[in-house]
Image (cartoon, helix red, strand yellow):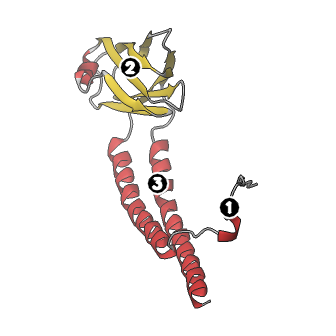
Amino acid sequence: MIAMIFGQARRCVGTVIIIIGLVMCIPSIALFLFADSLYGEPVGQGSLTLTPTKTTGTLEIVGVFKQGNDYDLRIKHVAYAANVDELGNLTLEMTYNKSGSGLAKFDDGWYPITKLGLNESHTASDVYEFDTKFAEDASLVLFFNLTVADNIRDVQITYSVYANPNRPLINTLNQVALWLLIPGIIVCCCGGIVAGPQKQDGSSTTRKSGATFVSRRR
């Protein structure tokens, strides 16, 4: 009886600590969302989908990069497995044509991207920062080639272009949000340790010889 009361007390205290930890995470999540909102609406967007039967595609970013502005370019890839019970393999290659001196730094950090053992889905993204004001208008054409698509249903590729982002403020807010998030996670972990493992009710899991046990939870 004493052990049961002690266990229930532990679980109650652990639950309270977890709730406190989750509450502590709220300001950091709000800061992350606020920092992301500072980018504003993208001045250019586009997307395409590649499949095992459509392995190549092109995204043209024309008429977006204007003289006198600086930009952030976000490129995101999301791959989905055809059969979630099997692991997939993916290799996606990207090449480009560009014009305009402002895109000189786009030579850094190239694909191909390879993902072996893909389980259900896989997301990869990159942000290219062109932090110098463009001296002239520029254009960019991205070419994608899906060279390996074992058990891959499709790959969705998107880009977003943001003009004149406030990078120092955004980076500072993200750093502060990260530091605020860490204590909340630690408190949640401590709450889980205090609560201990959840014990199952033995009466609901007892199996009789020769019988089939079926659990129905609503």
Specify whether residue 43 is in view: yes
Mark 3 nearby-residue class (10 Å; few <14, some 14–19, many ≥20): many
Q: Determine if residue 72 is in view.
A: no
Instruction: Name above or below for residue 207 compared with residue 35.
Output: below
Q: Which residue is mark 1?
A: 207
Q: Position of residue 189 (x, y in %)?
A: 44, 67
Farthest-out residue, front: 210
Q: Which residue is mark 3?
A: 31
Please give the name of the residue rendered at 58% of the width and 70% of the height, measured from the top-left corner: 199
SS category of the residue bearing label 3? helix
Which circle's residue, 1 or 2, is located before the other in the chain? 2
First in sequence, mark 3 or 1: give its number: 3
Which marked residue is nearer to the observer: mark 3 or mark 1? Answer: 1
20 over 123 or under it: above or below: below
Dot 1 amino acid type: Arg
Nearer to the camera, 121 or 94: 121
Other-residue count near label 2 (Cα within 10 Å), few / some / many at <14 / 14–19 / ≥20 = many
Residue position marked by numbered label 2 in the rendering: 65
Q: Amino acid at mark 2?
A: Phe
Q: Residue furthest bottom?
A: 2
Under circle 2, the secondary element is strand
